[in-house]
Image (tube, rainbow, N blue to C red):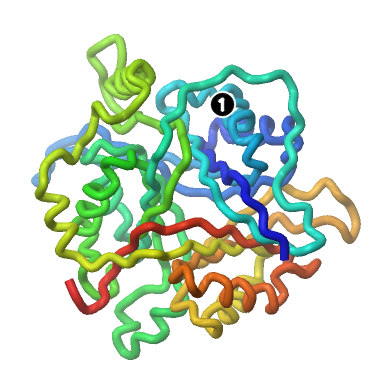
Amino acid sequence: MKRIACAKITCEVYQEISKTVAAAFSGMGIARPYIQSGRSIMLGEKRGWSLTGGQRLIEEMVDIYRITVPLEQESHVMNSIIQAAMLDQEGRGSIYSEHVELIVGDESAGTSQTTFAAEPPRYSTIQHLTGISTIVQRGQGDVIVRAALEMGICVPSVTYGIGAGLRDKLGLIRITIPAEKEIVNIITTHHDAQGALARLIEAGKLDQPGKGFIFTYPVARGLLNTRLYLGRHFSAASLGQIVSVLDEIKGTTDWRRKFTGTSDHSRAKKRTYLRELVDITVLCREGRATELAKAAMDAGASGATMSRLRQPISPNGGQGKLSPAREKLTMILPAAMADPVTTAIAAAGLFDAETHGEILLRPCPEAYTYTGGK
């Protein structure tokens, strides 16, 4: 196995401009990015009369592109995509990068090697962000989404998956916990991450059995969609546009810190968080994830979430042609278990010619789920 330090770049765009992003990747020589379909959700004006009042949720379909590139190419690739998709304009999408470890087979090429054309303009991005991912039962994702939007954090994205492992060990109670999952992902500033984490745990009632799992991960830099609200504006610029300009002028997001009091932090201190964890993401061809998940759990992993991805059709013909259907396994483990689990997955055939797999490792500073305590 080869271990490579690299940048994982994620780009979330509305499907009507997805082809523009695909063309930009292709123009840089990145032929097969991983693509996942999902929902991007905003707040909108309530239509008609309602007992509950408030604002409704408006969803748009998005394509989520993920690639890994050498660290030295991170800025060039991000700026090229921002330029091509005009992501510096409000309401078109988000892009962010993480510094991760990529594990591939000895014969694999590793990260995508880009073709440098003209140097793109440099865009202002926010550094030292935190990602928060919440895995809940199918149908419960909107509760987490609304809480994130009402905090004014960012535009959340929602994808789907199937849980395996821990649910199967719960005995009779497992019949009340659906295998189908919704994964809600948000990106926030590092100084608001702890407060946002506490609020999302409360909103999703994650301190109750079987309600879900939440974890954080570091994000190196990003340019985020600030269009949280879709509706009528009575000014020359929207609030999101004003926020973006102020971020650029000040060069930091500290001025819009949301959690300045002690209430969220005091509640957070009463909870028992899981720490010193690692997020293992396994990518493989369709049909292999179930067997690889079993190998991981035999090596000590407590569970996994499986999602479906796709890649553009391989330009190679004949037997070299790769299927566009892919699968992703996500597992959160104690850092000490990372090596035994990745070794077991590799031994199960992850890197063979049929499976065509790879592993991404990223740190998981904090996680929370019901463990029988507070």
Binning the other alpha carbons within 10 Å of mark 1 as few (below 14), some (14 to 19) or many (20 upward) gives many
Q: In this view, does 58 lie above or below 218?
A: above
- Residue 39 is situated, as x and y percent measured from the top left of the image, at 43, 46
Side of 216 relative to 305 (left or right)? left
Image quarter hosting the N terminus: bottom right
Identity of the residue drawn at 45% across and 21% down:
89
Q: Where is residue 287 in the image (x, y as percent from the top left)?
A: 65, 71
Q: Mark 1 points at which residue?
A: 85
> Residue sitting at 35 percent across and 29 percent down?
227
Q: Nearer the viewer, residue 109 or 335?
A: 335
User: Where residue 56 sits in the image (x, y, percent)?
Assistant: 24, 40
Q: Position of residue 7 (x, y in %)?
A: 59, 44
The answer to whether residue 348 is above or below residue 29 is below
Name the residue: 56% across, 42% down: 9
Q: In which quarter of the image is residue 266?
A: bottom left
Q: In this view, does 83 lie to the left or right of 110?
A: left
